[in-house]
Image (cartoon, grey):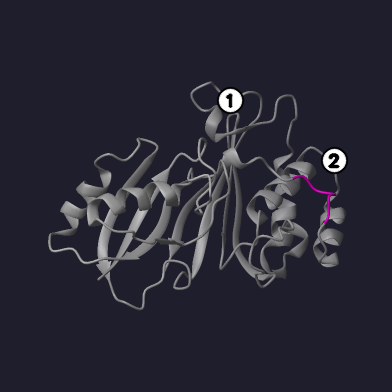
Amino acid sequence: MRWKAIVAYDGTDYNGWQSQNCRNTIQDVIEKRLAVIFKKEIRIHGSGRTDSGVHARGQVFHFDADWKHSPEKLLLAITTGSPETIQIKSIRQVAKNFHARFSAKRKKYCYQIYQGSAPPMETRFYWSLGNRKLDIDRMRSVASILIGEHDFTSFSAENGNKLKDAPNKLLSKLEIRKKGSKITITMEANGFLYKMARRITGALVDVGCEKVSIEDIQTILHNKKHTSDIETAPPKGLSLERAYY
């Protein structure tokens, strides 16, 4: 039996999604709970690998296990004993050919920015900009350049420990909304390179505070090379919102 689950988590205190030797990842915590329930090791597969400190409202994962009771009882069994920072939102049986990562058509991320200093109860989920002021119109001009299918190598970070991913991605949505001191950047694509969401956010902020020009971003995009000319936004403002199938 194959199961599909949706999980939300506060990633602040974890070393990302993917299992590591430190055993302090979201995957490790969930697998540990499943091992208690099924009395054996259960491997889960996520829709994407969120980095250390990154959050999720709609991370999807699947696993194979025989279960004689209802999905509701399985959900209760997983939730019981799990930390408050990791919450399984739903679980259901799916076809054997479903794969949380490879079946996904596109993913949605949101990045939250605070102009000034975020309140203490929100600081784990916002990038506080302090005295930096952003020109939202300039940021939206850059967003219009980045939307579409491009080689996003310039907006990724090198990491020899990760599998190489095809650099061409279709960024179908890049929206910037401001409400008071809060700015939310929403992006959707058929895939994201390593740190691509955070690098795009950093580039938008660099343009918004006039650290780099709109023309600079065009050049960086067309160069298709890893670069240190744009900022990488910190992980705490980023959340994986949804995977679409």
Q: Is residue 64 above or below residue 128?
A: below
Residue occupying the point 40% across, 58% down: 60
Which range of residues does the magenta coloring cover? 227-231
Q: Quadrant of residue 53?
A: top right
Query: Is 187 or 20 nearer to us in this picture?
Result: 20
Query: Is 146 or 177 nearer to us in this picture?
Result: 146
Residue occupying the point 12% across, 60% down: 69
The answer to whether one can see residue 35 in this image is: yes
Does the residue at mark 2 contact the one at mark 1 (Cβ under 8 Å)? no
Query: From this viewpoint, which residue is outermost toward the left?
Result: 69
Quadrant of the drawing holding the N terminus: bottom left
Please indicate whether residue 132 sits to the left or right of residue 122 in the image: right
| Element assignment for label 2 | loop
Q: Which mark is residue 118?
A: 1
Q: Which residue is mark 2?
A: 211
Please indicate whether residue 215 sits to the left or right of residue 39 in the image: right
> Callout 2: 10 Å neighbours few (<14), some, many (20+)?
few
The answer to whether one can see residue 57 in this image is: no
Q: Position of residue 167 (x, y in %)?
A: 70, 70
Q: Position of residue 238 (x, y in %)?
A: 57, 44
> Callout 1: 10 Å neighbours few (<14), some, many (20+)?
some
Q: Position of residue 29 (x, y in %)?
A: 40, 46
